[in-house]
């Protein structure tokens, strides 16, 4: 986690780039899941047929593409982390940034919680809470 504490305004300035990164990571993740499923189906088909032959070059190319997609997703998530964000749920597009809580928290460190599709960071939750405990920023 970043040592830096963000203000909502600082997170808001990051949202255009954050949106690009999360959308790209989600797309690569979807592609990887689809490719992983195809490879699993191929394995099952070969096993069910008692050893059906497959095109090993095509199989290897798909397996390498799956590895590449995994690397791309990790790089995108690392870029988000480099901005100070912690990706909590890639499929939902949830990213938290540490910040100072509102007066009701006594200025404690909280997570400023942004979700893909939100134009601004509008919610916060405690450091040991999650999305279900989001509260509106004042």
Image (tube, rainbow, N blue to C red):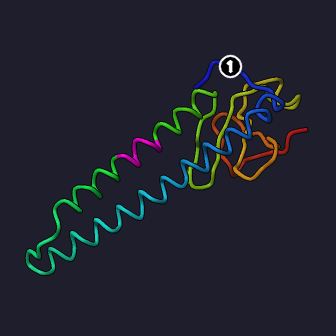
Magenta portion: prevailing SS class:
helix
Q: Quadrant of residue 36?
A: bottom left
Towards the viewer: 133 or 93? 93
List the single residue furthest toward the left: 50
Image coordinates for residue 74, horizontal then vertical, percent: 46, 39
List the single residue furthest toward the right: 138
Quarter of the image containing the N terminus?
Answer: top right
Towards the viewer: 134 or 118? 118
Image-based side of 134 in relation to 37, left or right: right
Q: Is residue 69 magenta?
A: yes
Image coordinates for residue 82, horizontal then vertical, percent: 58, 27
Q: Which residues make up the magenta segment? A: 68-73
Q: In this view, does 15 lie above or below 39?
A: above
Which residue is painted at 75% across and 46% down in the image?
134
Q: Quadrant of residue 135?
A: top right
Task: Give the residue pinned by disc 1.
Answer: 4
Which residue is painted at 34% across and 53% down in the image?
66
Q: Is residue 60 magenta?
A: no
Image coordinates for residue 63, horizontal then vertical, percent: 27, 55
Q: How many numbered circles does the render carry?
A: 1
List the single residue furthest toward the top: 3
Q: Residues within 10 Å of mark 1 (few under 14, many from 20)?
A: few
Image-based side of 100 in relation to 103, left or right: left
Which residue is painted at 42% across and 60% down in the image?
33
């Amino acid at each position: 986690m970043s040592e830096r504490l963000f203000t909502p305004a600082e997170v808001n300035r990051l949202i255009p780039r954050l949106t690009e990164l999360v959308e790209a990571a989600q797309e690569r993740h979807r592609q990887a899941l689809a490719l992983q499923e195809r490879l699993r189906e191929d394995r099952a088909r070969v096993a069910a047929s008692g050893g059906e032959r497959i095109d090993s070059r095509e199989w290897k190319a798909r397996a390498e593409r799956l590895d590449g997609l995994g690397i791309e997703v990790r790089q995108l998530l690392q870029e988000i982390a480099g901005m100070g964000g912690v990706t909590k749920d890639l499929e939902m597009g949830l990213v938290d940034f540490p910040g100072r809580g509102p007066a009701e928290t006594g200025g404690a460190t909280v997570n400023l919680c942004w979700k893909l599709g939100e134009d601004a960071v509008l919610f916060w939750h405690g450091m040991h809470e999650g999305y279900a405990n989001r509260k509106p920023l004042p």
